[in-house]
Image (spheres, rainbow, N blue to C red):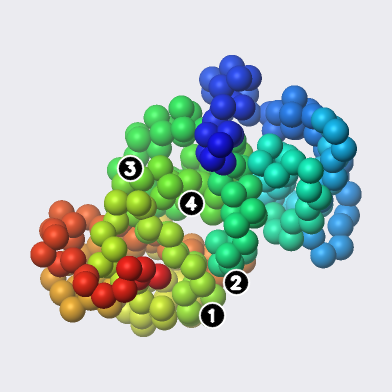
Amino acid sequence: MSPDIAAESRIASLGITSPDELDIEAIAFDAGISIEYRHLDGCAATLVGFGNRAIATIKPCEVRGRERFSIAHEIGHWDLHRGQSFQCRVFDINENLGKNHSKERQADSYAAHLLMPTSLFNPIIGTYKNPGFGELGEVAAQFDTSLLATSVRLVNVNKLPVIVACFTDGRRRWCLPAKDIPQHWRLRSVLDEDSFAYDLWKSGAIRPKPGKQSAETWFENDDEDEFEILEHSVMCGNDVIVLLYLTDAEMFDDRFEYQGRNSRW
């Protein structure tokens, strides 16, 4: 069973119908997991199980959404990888998106669907048109999740033509496009000096909402100067997280299809 189906099935079995019913400790208890909060060196959470019971130890964090994600992540390991012990090194999905740790990414996907199930998340996110980080913050508050996890969930829903990417020291760390974004749009590996994200990184210049930007600022295509996109950026620790919306319908035209590598990232 895929991580998303497993998580959604657990939510359905509990009869949860609103975000305020997503009590993650209660969900863990129902799954046979006891939660302990304790300082951990070198990791954010551990999971040890025997038979049908397990103990998840969570490192306390000042951001409640990250604690909840850690718990949901460990429930994911318990449902998907039972019989194994884990020491998970991150509170959130940022680190795992930048690496090819398949079991960690599976647990992340499970956690995202457990905390933001499709039946609850889609109707709420559907009330926004091209939401920026301010609006995504409102959604995150409803689900008690981190802004980053909420942004990644938005992409995976695949209802909007959006890309979320992370840049560290001006260089792309990871990039996640919605499934229906055409593969010929190849994101630059370094922040362009004309981008709003570059201004945020270099001078802390904050824009309250998404702004129009030339596509050539963000993409390497030969035809990118013909189009405009929407860009919004926010700092996440030392990283810049970027939302990019492809708002021009012609950007999905097959005549621009890239004939090179299968993966643009």
Instruction: Specify which label sits upstream in the sequence, 1 or 4.
Output: 4
Estimate the spatial distance between the alpha carbons at disc 1 and disc 4, rounded to whole Å: 21 Å
CA–CA distance between discs 3 and 2?
Answer: 29 Å
Residue type indicated by callout 3:
Lys
Q: From what the image shows, is residue 207 above or below residue 5? A: below
The quadrant in which residue 13 appears is top right
Q: Residue at x 85, y 33 (%)?
A: 51
Task: Say the numbered circle drawn on residue 159.
Answer: 3
Question: Which of labels 4 and 2 is toward the front?
Answer: 4
Question: Which residue is depicted at the point 26% across and 59% down?
Answer: 182
Drawn side of residue 60 relative to residue 115, left or right: right
Q: Which residue is mark 1?
A: 169
- Is tag 2's residue or tag 1's residue first in the polypeptide sequence? 1
Residue 85 visible to the viewer = yes
Answer with mark 4 or mark 3, whichever residue precedes in sequence. Answer: 4
User: Which residue, given by chain and number where applicable, does mark 2 sit on?
Assistant: 238
User: Percent x, y for residue 74?
Assistant: 72, 44
Q: Amino acid at mark 4?
A: Val
Q: Along the polypeptide, which appears first: circle 4 or circle 2?
A: 4
Mark 1 and mark 3 lie on one chain; the one further toward the N terminus is 3
Q: Quadrant of the N terminus?
A: top right
Position of residue 253 in the picture relative to residue 240 (left or right): left
Q: Tell me the tag on residue 152.
A: 4
